[in-house]
Amino acid sequence: MRSVLSPLGVRDFRRYYLGHTVSAFGDSMTPLALAFAVLHLTGSPVDLGIVVLSTRLPVILLTLLGGAIGDRFSRRAVMLLADLVRFAAHGVTATLLLTGTAQIWLLVVLQLVAGAGSAFFNPAAVGLITTLAGRERLQAANSLISISRSTASMLALGAAGALVALVGPGWAILIDALTFLVSAIFLHGLPRALATERVRSTGGLLASIRGGLGEVARRPWLSVWILHVALLNAVVISPILVLGPYVADRHLGGAPAWSAIGIAYAVGGLAGGLLSARWRPARPMVAAVLMCLLSAPLPALLALPAAVWQLALAGVGAGLQLVVYNVLQTTAIQQHLPERFVARATSVTMLGALVAAPLGMALAGPAANAFGAGPVLVVVAVTAGFITLATLLVPAVWRVGSTPAGHQPADPASPHTTGTANEVPPRPLGDRPAR
């Protein structure tokens, strides 16, 4: 346990961690609150899909730019500005809902703004953790962040379900807005010049983006990983995000039921964080991909729909899978790539993870209208297993090894870190992406 907690001994990481934990509490409230805000306004799964899509679209369009900026400028400053933008967007969203003046198109615009903030925040955050925690503590640091997110989610989802049922979704989104402000305050407390000495880029932003794409292209294992998570998000996660609240609203009693499933999901995430803090699989990509089989029971049981307690059990497995998958993937990127490329490689991974998601979100509602939510969710469950098993047939998946702490093969472009994966000699999503 001492090794798991070791990153908290680093003062600047501890400051970031506290701000992240507060922010994660609010962040866990908004998806549920926003989903039922839309359902209360129109009751349409198509409208719900459009609003959920608006939270993802800016990340798809801007994340490569966000990664380039996160590797060129102060990551602390980029993240602080992104938090303030999202504070404003969610604050206005809450005001519209509380005053009864919200319309679907206004919610879409505001989620586009908030999503733009996430496109710049997330790649910089992964790079900042590398600087704050040190490479020898990376998996422990990533696991601690997942544990705090899952713990905050357990508390937040219960609060969100109660707020939506009793006073309306606007209050939950208002709390989320305020937590962005708290996160910004903690980021402001970090050294202003943090990690600025690592900025070495001399070309323009387009050159930086090309450099990040090139680093990913040099690693077949990472390209396969990105394709796998892209398919998983498009045909499994995205339909659940749209049809899960819809099924809960129509058959399970509404927001409290979906909140209970979300809490169980967070419990699984907590277990996944504890597991990933100590588990160092020899082949992390194989382990991460195999874990995805745990995502299939949730859509299968939603298709029935099963009782809430059965869905909650499936949610535990899905939450555990997501956290272990994300920790292993994020740690692999942080360990195997030069530090100056981490934000850009993360942005490419995020883009790959999300680029196909709009198709899943856009089609889930119309498919449910045409064929029923149950049959669509059955297809989702079967596809989850098929994608996972097909990915395990790719040889590159089996060649990725874990990198011992402090051991980095030489990078021809850097005196510090490696540019290639450490392979065993012939040996890393959502509802949301990381915030």
Image (cartoon, rainbow, N blue to C red):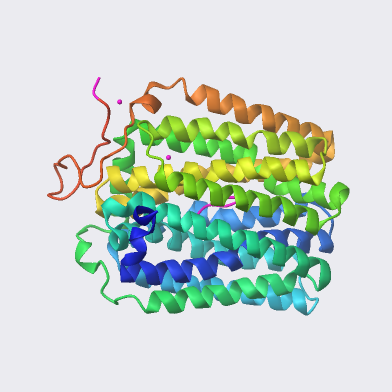
Q: Can residue 294 be seen in this view?
A: yes
Residue 176 location, x and y as percent? Answer: 61, 71
Is residue 259 placed above or below 268 in the rendered structure?
A: below
Q: Which residue is drawn at 23% across and 23% down?
A: 425
Viewer-proximal residue among 232 and 72: 232
Q: Is residue 435 visible?
A: no
Residue 38 location, x and y as percent? Answer: 77, 61
Residue 281 location, x and y as percent? Answer: 38, 34
- Main secondary structure along the magenta-highlighted residues: loop
Which region shows up in magenta?
Answer: 425-435
Q: Is residue 199 magenta?
A: no
Q: In which quarter of the image is residue 367?
A: top right
Viewer-proximal residue among 223 and 139: 139
Please state if 194 lies on the left or on the right of 322 as rendered.
left
Residue 178 location, x and y as percent? Answer: 58, 77
Please state if 125 lies on the left or on the right of 361 as rendered.
left
Is residue 52 placed above or below 76 in the rendered structure?
A: above
Is residue 419 placed above or below 135 in the rendered structure?
A: above
Q: Is residue 431 magenta?
A: yes
Viewer-proximal residue among 279 and 64: 279
Q: Which residue is drawn at 52% across and 46% down?
A: 272
Please state if 235 lies on the left or on the right of 428 as rendered.
right
Q: Residue at x 44, y 63 (%)?
A: 121
Q: Which residue is farthest front? A: 1
